[in-house]
């Protein structure tokens, strides 16, 4: 079925997929699952893919499709990186993981202060999972599917009128 769709429709489907994933992230946030730093990184390429989908309505060019594929691959890459941080395969940013920079540079008053940030969401903790996959993992998997749709749009010949 997907192989019979025009490049424009494929691009719109892929952009709609990014819109649904981004919307889902905001729904989870509304239900109290605050995003970590890496979660926020994963949102920006989806926003770019949505914008590219809007451009595709007016100009369904191959370059738009390739840029959409790049955006989908970028967010999938961020999702894979975030999954690795969550599973302890590699270290994540020190600003949102349990590693931290240590206490060596803190003064005695800083160490005793209770005024520290209380709203930091840790990147190495899984807030929600389904079927053994975290939100970051699901983003990676679904974004790879979207990347394939964008690539199909870029490589599919446009239909000739007639």
Image: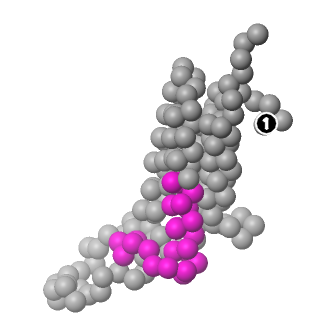
* Residue displayed at 43% across by 81% down: 98
Query: Foreground: 135 or 34?
Result: 135
Q: Quadrant of residue 83?
A: bottom right
Q: Is residue 35 above or below residue 85?
A: above
Residue 16 highlighted magenta (yes or no): no
Q: Is residue 11 above or below residue 106?
A: above
Q: Secondary structure at mark 1?
A: helix
- Residue 129 at x, y = what percent? 66, 66
Q: Is residue 13 above or below residue 97?
A: above
Q: Residue furthest top?
A: 162
The N terminus - image quarter: top right
Give left or right: position of 104 versus 56.
left
Name the residue tied to disc 1: 3
Task: Identify the magenta region.
Answer: 74-96
Q: Main secondary structure of the magenta part?
A: helix
- Residue 140 at x, y = what percent? 61, 59
* Residue displayed at 51% across by 47% down: 71
* Residue displayed at 57% across by 45% down: 69
């Amino acid at each position: 079925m997907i192989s019979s769709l025009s490049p424009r429709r494929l691009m719109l489907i892929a952009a709609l997929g990014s819109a649904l994933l981004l919307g889902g992230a905001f729904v989870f946030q509304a239900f109290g699952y605050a995003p970590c730093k890496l979660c926020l990184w994963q949102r920006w390429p989806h926003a770019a893919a949505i914008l590219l989908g809007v451009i595709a309505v007016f100009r369904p060019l191959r370059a738009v499709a390739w840029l959409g594929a790049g955006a989908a691959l970028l967010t999938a890459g961020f999702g894979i990186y975030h999954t690795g941080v969550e599973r302890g395969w590699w270290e994540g940013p020190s600003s949102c993981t349990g590693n931290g920079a240590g206490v060596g540079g803190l003064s005695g008053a800083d160490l005793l202060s209770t005024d520290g940030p209380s709203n930091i969401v840790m990147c190495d903790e899984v807030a929600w999972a389904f079927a053994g996959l975290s939100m970051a993992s699901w983003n990676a998997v679904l974004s790879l599917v979207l990347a394939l749709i964008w690539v199909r749009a870029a490589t599919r010949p446009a239909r000739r009128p007639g």
